[in-house]
Image: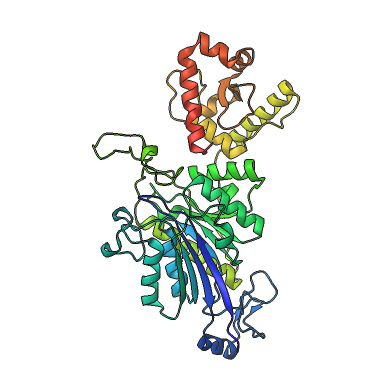
Amino acid sequence: MEERVKCLGLVGAGIVLGTVSTVFLLKLLPRSVAKQCEEKAIKINGNGLVSENSEGCTVSGNKNHGMAGLDLLKDEIVSEQLTSHAASMLLRSGVGRLLLVDFDQVSLSSLNRHAVATRADVGFPKAQCLKEHFLSIYPECHIDAKVLLYDASSEAEILSGNPDFVLDCIDNIDTKVALLAACVRRGLKVLSATGAGARADPSRIRVADLKESTNDPLSRAVRHRLRKDHGIDGGIPVVFSLEKPKAKLLPFKGPSGEEENPSDYQIVPGFRVRIIPVLGTIPAIFGQVMASYVVTQLAGLQVQTEPVVNLDMDHYRILHQRLIEHEELLYGTAMEVQVDIEEVMYVAKELWHGRSAREQSPKEVGRGMWRSVNELMLVRWDRTKPASVSNLILLKFIEADEHESSTVDDIKEKEPEFFRRVTSVLKRAELDFGL
């Protein structure tokens, strides 16, 4: 039987002290496996069968005939150390050909969460590191390693192999959005990983549509950019944690030990230099979840994931609807409302803590917000700009009426302290969403 070649790619982009790998898993069906496929017909999900055709055993995802075997993987994955765990398990599941892509090197700080790297690998390209270790596990596997950064110029080289799946774990917003948009444009199946840092509860890891992910700043920013820049609103499955991050990016200290500007030390513009604390078990579990998702999808096995339940979303829906109605009343249209309900939750909860922007000492969001929701609404900070995450403030009704009668320049002149406080908060939204 002629050998059947299939591919699986893991695409990513790395960063200093916290990287993202790219791996293409190109599966080569060995003759021994082909023989097993001839001898066995395994029923999958009641209607998918392992079958033989002129090219050997193949997997069909949502087709009438689902074909399964030891080497039936064909997808892409990307992640900061999630890739190593996902790729490792896909390799051990029988993938026969891999393309590993990552421009970063193994660092001391990554050893707590890397699947195979050792102290001797520090300073070695991560793609090459994975290749060498993988060949010691499955020497028959055909592995190619590229020290390469994913961007527009490398898109064709990385994605032109038409992989069955792309698993994205990039943590740079611009690069992540570009990869996901490219996959959608090319019609490639893609699974995206969101932030695994600053989490500690493995029981809260979920797989759902990107538009359903919560408590994750990275997925929130990516969702916003995909909708704004590419008109993509959901339809991309993601692995994420319902757990709210327990820490933020650590302060960046230079060689002198003093805090310095992180951008002065960027090797690649736009890529993060500061780090976030990572419990090594969580990225590993993210990677295992990704591998499981890929294997079951390619085998045609339908797994019902646990639904994501968002409590108290009705309160944010009320604020969202009020914003729309206010825009229609004031501007005659709501076309410039550039936020969805989850982004309204971010603005009301994360930026303004459920209190009016006029309050000097806003407290953490709690029951008080819901007691006062009937007198709160979102309005534009600057009337000349759209109603976006970086241009919305939470005010009481009477405050909103007064605000609409003034300009930002008026506020800057008459209330400089209030102006500085609001612009500082809205600047955070720009940073969180990569605007």
Nearer to me, 277 or 128:
128
**How far across and down, in percent of the image, does residue 348 sit?**
53, 30
- Figure check: 327 above or below 45: above
Q: Which residue lies furthest to the front in this view?
A: 153
Residue for point 55% across, 45% down: 222
Quarter location, residue 117 = bottom left
Quarter location, residue 376 = top right
Quadrant holding the N terminus: bottom right
Q: Residue furthest top?
A: 414
- Figure check: 284 above or below 247: below
Nearer to me, 188 or 245:
188
- Figure check: 185 above or below 371: below
**How far across and down, in percent of the image, does residue 374 sit?**
60, 24
Q: Which residue lies furthest to the left in this view?
A: 256
Q: In this view, does 234 lie to the left or right of 33?
A: right
**How far across and down, in percent of the image, does residue 244 sit?**
44, 43
Quarter location, residue 38 = bottom right
Quadrant holding the C terminus: top right
- Asked if residue 216 shows in the view, the reply is no
Which colouring convention does the figure follow? Answer: rainbow
